[in-house]
Amino acid sequence: MPLRHWLAAFEPIADDAAVRPLRVGAEDWRRLAEDVAASGGRLLALWGQDATAGRPAVFAAYQTAAGLWIAELVCDAPAVADDPYPGLQDLYPFAGRMQRAIRDLHGLRSTDPDHRPWLRHAPGEAYEFVRVEGDGVHEIPVGPVHAGIIEPGHFRFSVVGEKVLRLEQRLGFAHKGIERRFLEFAALDGSRLAARVSGDSAVAYSWAYCIALESQWGVRIPRRAQWLRALALELERIANHLGDLGALGNDAGFAFGLTQFSRLKEQVLRATEHALGQRYAMDWVVPGGVSRELPPDAATALDRCLAEVGAESVVLRGIYEEHAGVRDRFTGTGAIAPDLAARLGLTGLAGRASGQVQDLRRDLRFPPYEELRPAIGGAVSGDVAARVAVRFDELLESCRLGRRILAQLPGGDLRVAVVAPAPAAFGVGAVEGWRGPVLVALATAAGGRIRRCHPHDPSWQNWPALEHAVIDNIVPDFPLINKSFNLSYSGHDL
Amino acid sequence: MLKTLRQIQRTGIVTEPVPAPDPTLRIRAVLEQRILGILGRALAIRMVDAGSCNGCELEVNALTNPIYNIEGLGVHFVASPRHADLLLVSGPVTTAMRDPLLRVYEATPDPKLVVAIGDCGRDGGVFGCGGPSLGAVANVIPVDVVVPGCPPSPNRLLAGILAALDASAALDVRQEGGGRAE
Ligand code: SF4
């Protein structure tokens, strides 16, 4: 069925309208998923709720050519109460883990076959890894505590000699009950927790949270606040790319890259602290706008910093591209071809490096990006080299966007007062963070309380793809491949 | 190669001077002296993320950049707890990380120091304590020093490491080289 068929059923998600998820039956739950997939749309998030939030239900957020659509399948209706709800893993392979998480957190089962726990780690209960049998195959377990300064997670490699036959991830070690914790926050205060779902994407999460809240409460934020939020989001993108580009050089045996990029990153963090008050802008985006005014000289200082970082990054890019050793380690390593990327639903910067050129800053046209018109690029080779190239492109584009924002920053208020209206409501916010699309679905109750909040990280989509990226590569290349994606554990484990 | 060398030359030395007029930067000089005085060799740190949001790790990583240049002070991060003098632990500790954290603690040779970092390492921070969050690092292993902040800045982290060294030195004097009171 063409997507058109559904069009009348969905309410548009505009930035000034509350939205109601479309309630579907089990059959339509499946049919909608098929139609969206067939039309080239994508599943952004899949989450559930139990009786604590009203009725047990599962939700899906789709990005279609007609905008964001939210579907809800109530699971205490007679049709699905005893039976499992229809799984979507055949259409969207990454949905499998989300469905396992829904079962862990809310007890709702899908029809898909894999019911191993995912986020929940029962003490004493052994996790069943898939075993690879064969001559000379052995397993290398790594983690959850890693050698470097990174987040906890477990990787199990099946290898022959140096070659990786299979990687299986076991995540959930950073699961700290974030969704439950939201219920203890007033909706007006929830942006603080949202910002800390994944600390490297604080602006993306707090902004998505605020859109979800402001849209359902009918709050229109000042233009100046929109531009200042975008400034912070681009600074976040710049800082993360700088950090990862340095680490990638280091993992390729080129410590010079780490020294240079970590120095530039520190410059950006200090300029950010001067302008926004924090090195990592955890509490910059707040309901109604942003938290404080830029100090008088901050715009000039920040502009100078971005100009410098941009210019230096161009030089460093040249050095990376000409360095035979670096080029050799990056090229062809950890590749995901475009057709596989499309099938796996690879998203964000990793998706763009594998020919999936999508970016919410362009595709959802939310302010101020409809005015800023960021250039969205991509690559097709899908290897570490492609992800590095996309990071360089996006780093330079963000420096340009940041400088443009500073040059044309609208005047006016920073923030409008926000008061909770009486009735319960629901809203969704989606923002393209540096890693990919970050989505927050938020249901509020009377009195400004939070009834349900689901923050969604693009790492849900990309972790399973990483398992594909390492096949046939050598074990020592894993850190490099892993870093080129740099997926979130905390944002995924919740 | 020429480009690389030119870039190195252009960048020069960016490590912040010791001591600097800013009092927080004096920490560097003191830290360096203490490490030499107490250990007589480099201080080995093992980082354990016991469930953080990754914000704390970003600032720990910053310690290794050429501005803070923690290696230059005689501190290095090691890959195994068996080589560590000090554990740097971020929180909140999750139920799934409780046992791995205990194992790291047990594998670290005595005398060992533990620095819990971040508001979350202190008391669970924004995530609180309940359900799968066990909150403070001290709820799971003994902690010598807490460095609050969300995330704590690199200079605060340096100050925390210094405080842990001082505490251990004081303890050693009192106990004449004995183990740690817990
Ligand atoms: S203290 Fe702040 S930065 Fe550190 S883990 Fe907790 S929320 Fe994240």
Image (tube, coloured by chain):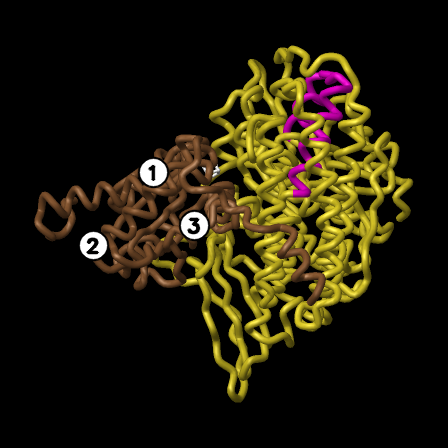
Chain colours: A yellow, B brown
Q: Is mark 2 within 8 Å of ligand 1?
A: no
Residue A111 visible in the picture: no
Compared across the picture, whether A341 is left or right of A147 comes to right
- On the same chain, marks 1 and 3? The answer is yes
Label placed on residue B70: 3
Label placed on residue B111: 2
| Cα gap from disc 1 to disc 2, whole angstroms | 22 Å
Q: Secondary structure at mark 3?
A: helix
Please say if the residues under marks 1 and 2 sit with CB atoms less than 8 Å apart: no
| For discs 1 and 2, the disc positioned in front in the rendered view | 2
Q: Is mark 1 within 8 Å of ligand 1?
A: no
As shown in the figure, which amino acid type bears the numbered disc 2?
Pro
Q: Residue at x 46, y 42 (%)?
A: B17
Quarter-of-image position of residue A254: bottom right
Q: Which badge, 1 or 3, is on the more N-terminal residue? A: 3
**Label 1 sits on residue:** B136
Q: Please, is residue A340 above or below residue B22 in the view?
A: below
Label placed on residue A20: none
Q: Secondary structure at mark 1?
A: loop
List x then y, in percent, for residue A488.
57, 49
Q: Which residues are magenta?
A: A209-238
As shown in the figure, which amino acid type bears the numbered disc 3?
Ile
Number of marks in picture: 3
Please say if the residues under marks 1 and 3 sit with CB atoms less than 8 Å apart: no
List x then y, in percent, for residue A466.
63, 62
Q: Please, is residue A313 above or below residue A63 in the view?
A: below
Residue B89 is a magenta residue: no
Q: Residue at x 70, y 68 (%)?
A: A323
